[in-house]
Image (tube, grey):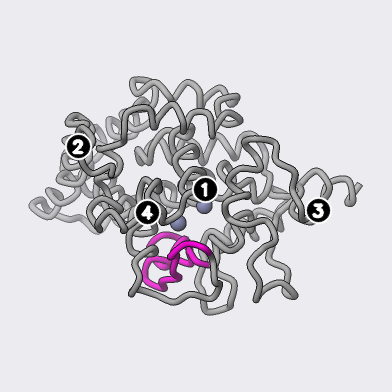
Amino acid sequence: MFKNDKLNLFLFIALIGLQALGLAALLTRFEWSYLPIILFMYFWGGISTTLYLHRYLTHRGFEMPAWLKFFFATGSAVALSGDPVTWVGDHRYHHLKSDTDEDIHSPLHGFPYAHMMWLVRKPEGFRDRSLRYAADVRKIWYCRLWEKPYFYIIPHLLVAAALYFTLGGAGLLWCLYVPMLVIYNFTWAVNSICHMPSLGYRRFETTDHSKNNFWVGLGAFGEGYHNNHHAKPRCAAHGLRWWEFDMTRYVIWTLEKFGLAWSVHWPKPEALKEVDPVSADEAGALLLFGAKIRDPSLDVSHHELQSR
Ligand SMILES: [Zn+2]
Ligand SMILES: [Zn+2]
């Protein structure tokens, strides 16, 4: 149904171009001195998307200090992961409509569409709907500012300029666009591969087709345990067993140990086999429309009251 919507040619060229820059690095000389910067950019851009845009901003799985939020928000902007308001709105809508005709990035509409093409063929009016679903995010000044593309690209351009003037063209390609190429495709794989009928395993009988996938989990900082996530949308951990390597979980855990994260929604051992009473659909809606949360343990304000 969305496949025939008008192509956003500018965004299509931009997304292909950014990935082409990552591939173009292979034509230039690699220096070992790039490696720490590559790893840092991959980590900063990747964890900013999973920890900040997804687990914090979309699902409010924990709280953290304002300066740390800004640090991760900036990391996601440097990697051009998508402006926070649009990202959150789109993703909450996905939880509401997972694998139905209305799901904007279900593989039901074909793999290329689920992976990348949904970004460039968004139906007319979809953005307005996403904005409503991210009304809370629009209250954050930098998220609101970054709704304007010319402000949103500033952090990216600053980092790109710094890399170009210190390491030259090859350094820029290797240190910025190679990590972005990897981050893009692992992030998109959560939408495409982790909703494919045949790739991965399901622990929970959720209403969608979500799957847990080790490889996507490895590259996407734990987000590959997507069936776990659909079953427990607000949980700060996606990997629920020791072998489900979830880097984002370990980072949040470390932040909590240093007092830099609190009110964290960790999985409860007694509820590991069950889908949360707040369904995936409701979890998307509850923050947006002030829906009543049925499970008090998932209500942050209730949690905070208890700990006082
Ligand atoms: Zn999903
Ligand atoms: Zn989610």
Classify mark 1: helix, strand or loop: helix
| Amino acid carrying mark 4 in the image | Thr
Q: Nearer the viewer, mark 1 or mark 3?
A: 1
Disc on res. 187: 4
- Along the line of sight, the residue nearer the viewer: 163 or 226: 226
Classify mark 2: helix, strand or loop: helix
Q: Nearer the viewer, mark 3 or mark 2?
A: 3
Whether 215 is among the magenta residues is yes
| Amino acid carrying mark 2 in the image | Phe
- Percent x, y for residue 31? 20, 55
| Amino acid carrying mark 3 in the image | Pro
Residue named by callout 2? 12
What are the residue bounds of the magenta stretch?
207-227
Whether 282 is among the magenta residues is no
Q: Height in image: 239 above or below 262?
A: below
At 49% from the left edge and 51% from the top edge, which residue is drawn?
Answer: 50
Using the numbered discs, state the Cα–Cα distance from disc 2 to disc 4 in whole angstroms: 17 Å
Residue 189 relative to residue 94: left or right: left
Q: Quadrant of the N terminus?
A: top left
Q: Residue furthest left?
A: 27
Is residue 74 something one can see in this rendering? yes
